Amino acid sequence: MIDEQQIVQALKPIKDPDLKFSIVKLGMIGNIGIDGDKVTLSLKLPLPGSPGEKTLLDEIKSAVSGLNGVTDTQVTVSLMTDAERLDLANRIHGREEKGGASGGPTQISEKAVANAAPLALDSDGKIAETDPKRRQVAEALETVEDPEIHLPLTALGMVKHIGIGDDDVAIEVTLTVPGCPLKDKISSDVTAALKKHDWVRNVGIQFGVMTEEQRQRVAEIVRSSGQEQPDAWKKMSPEELAKRVIVVCSGKGGVGKSTTTTNLAFALANTGYRVGILDADVYGFSIPRMTGIHGQPRVQGDKLEPLAKGNLQIMSMGYFVDENAPVIWRGPLLHKAMKQFLQDVSWENLDYLFLDLPPGTGDVTLTIAQALPNAEMLIVTTPQPVATHVAGRVAALAERTKIALLGVVENMSYYEKNGVREYIFGKGGGKELAEKLGVPFLGEIPLDQTIRERSDTGKPVTLDRKLAISTPYFEISERIANVHAPLISV
Ligand code: ADP
């Protein structure tokens, strides 16, 4: 007859694929039942959706089935309770420390683990703990910032549970991404902050990972934190940046917003104006590629110097950002950085500053629109009804934020072959949109291979006024120069 001890022994060598510790020692195995030659047991997972779950189940079944006399093994999978997870964290923590150079394991009392309860916050995200010790701990945690996002862990919802013992604290911290490289830093910051209280001798931290929904929530918090500093924005006035600030928007991506921005900027520069481009399209920084202006902007005092070429000055967030960073992080973080960009770039005597914004009516667009009320919005659309419809939404945003609409440019309007124009994407959508909005229709740009090739290789067609294909851009830039947008504010 088989007994429970044999089963436990058989399972001991199996390690959790993520945590790299024995599942038995981690307390992940429970409710072992033996009924003749049938074995039932439960596997308790610390986190839902572990990618290693299937491997683990296979290993458990094969280990138990390999025991003499077992014909059937049933494993039920469940999620650990919060207390069980904290316990698991402490087991791991103790082991890690044991193996480390610093010696002894951190002993977290059962009392701290058993007391673990969610951190209480009020509706404004302020600490609402009433117990004095819990409050002390929560306030200490409030001083610890996420090293990347630079906001307190508490405000970001990263502190999930706090458990208080007599002289120790058990904390559960949820990380935004699994395998967060900043885990050690967070761990030492949390420990240092808590140990400032004399009564705290030991700190046990369990790390979990946020769900997608929680991550979105963090992104929201980061975004709104950027908007909650109106003072910094208020100092901004478009006049400080350039004589005219033109915010280029599109309803959706891929309509040629960056291509149009680049060519119009080059056309105006070629006409003799001093022109800047600020590339803030976090979904793809194309301005360095399209302008062919690459490099590392220099810091001069507390200002960033744009990269300059002739009459052009360029600043792209792409010069500073890891291209591989996930967009969800790029968005909110850059949104914060945007403020810095608007304030800290030392543009020199610009006549025009073009802002290449992300497509749609996202936060960057909204914030910019609010921050620069005297800026003018240029809408780029293709002729399709869908594109003009979404572009219309951008215009509605302009109306809401009282930003002036400069006009509509229609891109990829037609394809010309042997003097015959084909209206591939439909005809007249841009013009209709402009009429509907009551703003100038500034012109049509054809779909043209030279435009694409030259933009994509850093030699926009408007570098050369003699090129026939550059004419529509020069005409549009002339109209822009002649329009006094604030007079047509919607
Ligand atoms: P967005 O900034 O709206 O995402 P891009 O300016 O990056 O769009 O343009 C998307 C692609 O379409 C680029 O490869 C660009 O070269 C090409 N493109 C844009 N406008 C034209 C045009 N008028 N003719 C041909 N290709 C174009």
Image: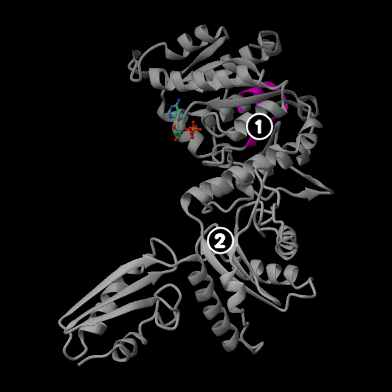
Quarter the C terminus occupies: top right
Q: Is residue 307 above or below residue 420?
A: below
Disc on res. 174: 2
Q: Residue 73 falls in which quadrant of the image?
A: bottom left
Q: Is residue 195 magenta?
A: no
Q: Which residue is mark 1?
A: 367
Q: In the picture provided, is 345 more to the left or to the right than 254?
A: right
Q: Residue at x 77, y 38 (%)?
A: 343
Q: Residue at x 77, y 30 (%)?
A: 241
Quarter the N terminus occupies: bottom left
Colour mode of the rendering: one colour
Nearer to us in this view, 150 or 87: 87
Amino acid found under the numbered disc labelled 2: Thr
Report, in whole angstroms, how far the alpha carbon at label 1 lies from the one at label 2: 29 Å
Secondary structure of residue under mark 2: strand
Going from the N terminus, do you reach mark 1 or mark 2 first? 2
Badge 2, how many Cα within 10 Å: few under 14, some, many 20+?
Answer: many
Nearer to us in this view, 330 or 483: 330
Q: Please state the total of marks drawn on the protein image.
A: 2
Disc on res. 347: none
Q: Residue 476 falls in which quadrant of the image?
A: top right
Amino acid found under the numbered disc labelled 1: Thr
Q: Is residue 217 above or below residue 267?
A: below
Quick check: can you spot residue 18? yes
Nearer to us in this view, 428 or 339: 339
What percent of the width, then of the height, locates residue 2? 23, 91
Q: From which residue to which does the magenta span run?
A: 266-279
